[in-house]
Amino acid sequence: MKLAGLFMFLFSLTLTVSPAARIHSWDAPYRWLHWIGFFVWLACSAILHRLIQSKLPDRDPYILPVALLLAGWGLLTIWRLDAVFGLRQSAWLGVGTLAIYLGLRVPRLLFLLRKYKYIWLTGGLLLTAMTFLFGTYPGGEGPRLWLGCCGIYMQPSEPLKLLLVVYLSAYFADRLRDRFSLIQLLSPTLILAGAALVILLAQRDLGTASIFITLYFLIVYLVTGKKRILLFGAAVVLIAGLAGYQLFDVIRLRVDAWLNPWADSSGRSYQIVQSLIAIAAGGVFGSGAGLGSPSLVPVAHSDFIFASIAEEFGLVGITGLIVLIALLVSRCLRTALYAPNRYQRFLAAGLGGYFTVQSILIIGGNLRLVPLTGVTLPFVSYGGSSLVTSFLSILLLLLISSRTDEAAPLPDPQPYTLVSSGLLLGLGAVALIGGWWGFFRAGDLQSRTDNPRWAIADRYSPRGAILDRNNGTIVQTTGEAGDYTRQLLYPQLSPVTGYTHPAYGQTGLEASMDGYLRGMEGTPTSTIWSYELLYAQHPPGLDLRLSIDLDLQKIVDEQLGDHRGAVVALNARTGEVLVMASHPNIDPNQIDAQWDTWIQEQSAPLINRATQGLYPPGTALAPFFLAQTGNIDDLPALPGSLGYISGDLRLFCLQSSSAPTWATAITGGCP
């Protein structure tokens, strides 16, 4: 508990001072509101620790601290993303604490759950079915899976998962003493579990339905020890997925986005692509608490909270998160092995499976390991129903682990060994996939044009200026840290300098020399690393000096005026470009207001006519052509055109279907 408290304090402190790190100044608007969440967590943790220590002195010592650390990590992450949701989650943390307190005051709670198993599960089913009549969506438009009003909502499918595990554990523990065939043993559970599955499929809640199917066959396998149950369960999940793909549009869209998210990265695959970019942005050590941009991922506080943690804590952080989940699951399975009877053994193992399967589904969805399911990450994601259900599950585990009775006999430990190995391997797989996106593919993902983090970074770290040959400023960065903007002082040079914009991308020198202007090239590697480690930013950019002579450029632009065309003036001795004019052109300072007009203009002002236009070369290329070919008179003329060819070298001044004339030859600039 002390380590959990230290982590939470350091996390809170880092969030507070992170604005100062972003603007490199102690004169910053510090964050304070999340300390409410910290003190709520601290109070709830202290209450639960004292309560459990006095009521259940022989409980497993790791289950509660790990659960509280996960809940606190998620709570502060939610506060960092949205203070309103953070305040609500703090209130739900208090409700979860109250639920454990009241549960400890219920005599023989485990016995009551076992005795009235049919009532509990039927009540959960009826409550879930009520969403068809009274269901709502707290966000306004969306799946109507919640019940409630006045700002307080409950998702019945969350406690229904717990009730399913309780029911299956109690039923099988009571029936195993009788001699039934496998079909007779499973029939009642198939009816109730099937009813729950039908309700969830009708709600199009693919994630919860997948968890139900997996938990059902997992517990049946632990009870019977028959491996074909696992194969049959995998087949059912596959068939249900294929049926859902054919029947429901929302499932089809999610599967298509999972199979090829790059095909529509700004549409139906936007969430998953942005999630992968966020994980890549975290890299190995993360951007640092409060220094990333996790809110760029939609629903970051709930469905994509893993991506939020990955961006600011990096691979080190998500590895720690997965290790905590694995530790919790291993303690659940250990509790199952030492349980005093079969009912509690099945219950503890089922709860461990519930935590693992749901964690793998949501983390795997963030990592594109499986399609998005919309379930929550236990203890971590925003959601009162999920958090309270997770706390009630912890209460049951603590009650089971505190038993001093001798462990019930375990005739065949192989099912538990296989299940525990499979669950831990699943968590290991998501950790490896996290390393793939966060390390090996990080460079490709961060360089994508739909990654807005570079534009955000430019607001906090200045880009280098663009100067003419006499150090006259052409482009500069103005403003203060957090509000830096790019300003072109001589807009007529926009075809050369281009622009950099978060919505319209980059062109010209702003694009081709972006690495230097952003300080990622030409800067010592140690400086780049220190800025990324301390501030999650690139260092100040380097200035770029051109061969352009701004005084000559102004003269040429004035002479060219409103004529459409281009002028390039070179230093004949050195080949330096002294002037590059293209008319018409744009003023990038007005890009937000004028973009729609520019892209529709027939004059194409966005084109640099000096580098992108096509013009007859005239006599300028004739000496070079002669030097390459030797004797130009020996080259055959091309029929129907004026020009010469020698091997792969071709020089055309005029191509026409009709016979060339003196007029067309002179117009074409033929030598």
Image: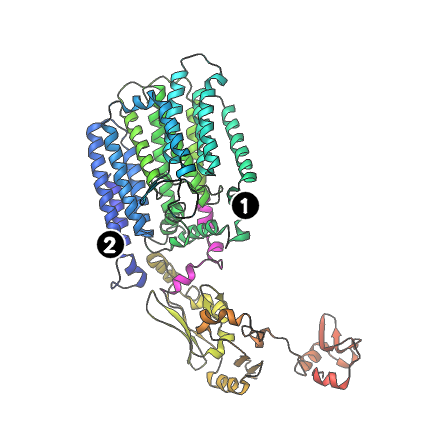
Position in image of residue 236 (x %, y %):
52, 30
Residue at image mark 1: 256
Residue at image mark 2: 32
Q: Residue furthest front?
A: 133
Query: Height in image: 501 above or below 371?
Result: below
- The structure residue drawn at horizontal position 48% and vertical position 42%, both measured from the top left corner, is 369
- Element at label 1: helix
Query: Height in image: 329 above or below 20?
Result: above
Position in image of residue 434 (x %, y %):
44, 45
Of the 4 image quadrants, the one containing the C terminus is bottom right
Position in image of residue 295 (x %, y %):
38, 53
Number of residues whose C-alpha sits closer than 10 Å to that of mark 2, classed few (under 14), some (14–19) or many (20 or more): few
Q: Nearer the viewer, residue 526 or 323?
A: 323
Position in image of residue 174 (x %, y %):
38, 17
Of the 4 image quadrants, the one containing the N terminus is top left
The part of the chain drawn in magenta is: 433-462
Q: Name which quarter of the figure residue 320 lies in.
A: top left
- Element at label 2: loop
Query: Height in image: 648 above or below 36?
Result: below
Q: Amino acid at mark 2?
A: Trp
